[in-house]
Image (spheres, rainbow, N blue to C red):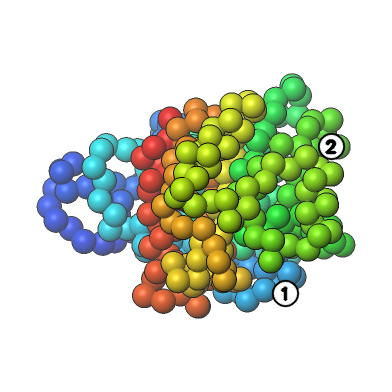
Amino acid sequence: MSWNKPGPWGGRDDGPGAPNARWHNTIEAWQTGGGAGSTLLGFASDEGVRRNKGRTGARTGPGALRAALANIALQEPVKLSDAGDVSVAGTDLEAGQKEFANVLAALLVDGQFTVGLGGGHEITFASYSGIAKALGSAGDWTLGCVNIDAHFDLRVADQASSGTGFAQIAAAEAAAGRSFRYAAVGIAEASNTKVLFDRAAELGVQVLLDTECHLGNLDGVQKFVADFAESVDHLYLTIDLDALPASVAPGVSAPAGFGIGLEVVRAIVVAAARSGKLMHADIAELNPDFDLDQRTARTGARLINDLIMNKG
């Protein structure tokens, strides 16, 4: 694994000053002690996807997300920074997750609101590990995990993968003597076996199915997220782009045959951002090899922008 410094950003230049601000001419390389703001950290990995027998290619996702973010216009002043990418070397996923956690913890201790750029959904355990390290092993804090996803990611296996993240978190929380707090939004019955539903029930996972996540139930979806956030001390949000319909997000490892609408996903993201509890968020499973006209990358970039601009 390696931690690579951020490369240069570029994009459309409409002129100087705040009225012409876009991501590319606002964001700076992160420096310790540079002041609180929102900081990106990439996780260039698809080893977890390979282990989970998915379509590889997500390791180039962080660069595609940055390219899609570059020209997004900023309506209000915001402090943005880029901490570069942690790259998984070969098949050593575990070392990459540990390095990502170490860098993320340093960013959080520095006062940053952080956004992880995947990469496969193996970023989940790396993100959790960084948050836990920043919060410290002592104390009785509670961390709530909100996962926008078609899948529970509760597989139990000999090796970590993109499908084991929340099983790993459950085990780590139990070992630390803390309760496992997990809300899964957008779960597809067609994509999860009864074994996984039973495991979710045993672990006390709060679940909203994809069929419940529609505009007619938007108030209920937002309340679900707000109530969950209210019940914990800190919040972690992870967005798996395969929760969206394949027509919106074709560039993922496992395209959705049904999915939940972008308006609903955005509402969930905004509700989490405005909860006052959100420490860290990440976005996963963008696979540029299968994207069409940057459709998935642009959707992910818009969600990242809306997340940061609504962060309370």
Q: Residue furthest left?
A: 15
**Left or right of 292 in this view: 252:** right
| Residue type (three-letter) at the residue carrying disc 2 | Ala
Where residue 49 sits, quadrant-wise, is bottom right
Coordinates of residue 23 in the picture (x, y in percent): 31, 51
* Residue at horizontal 70 percent and vertical 25 percent from the top: 141
Asked whether residue 2 is in view, the answer is no
- The residue that disc 2 covers is 174
Few, some or many C-alpha atoms within 10 Å of disc 1 (few <14, some 14-19, many ≥20)?
A: few
Coordinates of residue 53 in the picture (x, y in percent): 72, 74
* Residue at horizontal 50 percent and vertical 66 percent from the top: 245
The quarter in which the N terminus is drawn is bottom right
Coordinates of residue 15 in the picture (x, y in percent): 12, 52
Judge whether 182 appears above or below 291 on screen: above
Asked whether residue 131 is in view, the answer is yes
The quarter in which the C terminus is drawn is top left
Mark drawn on residue 53: 1
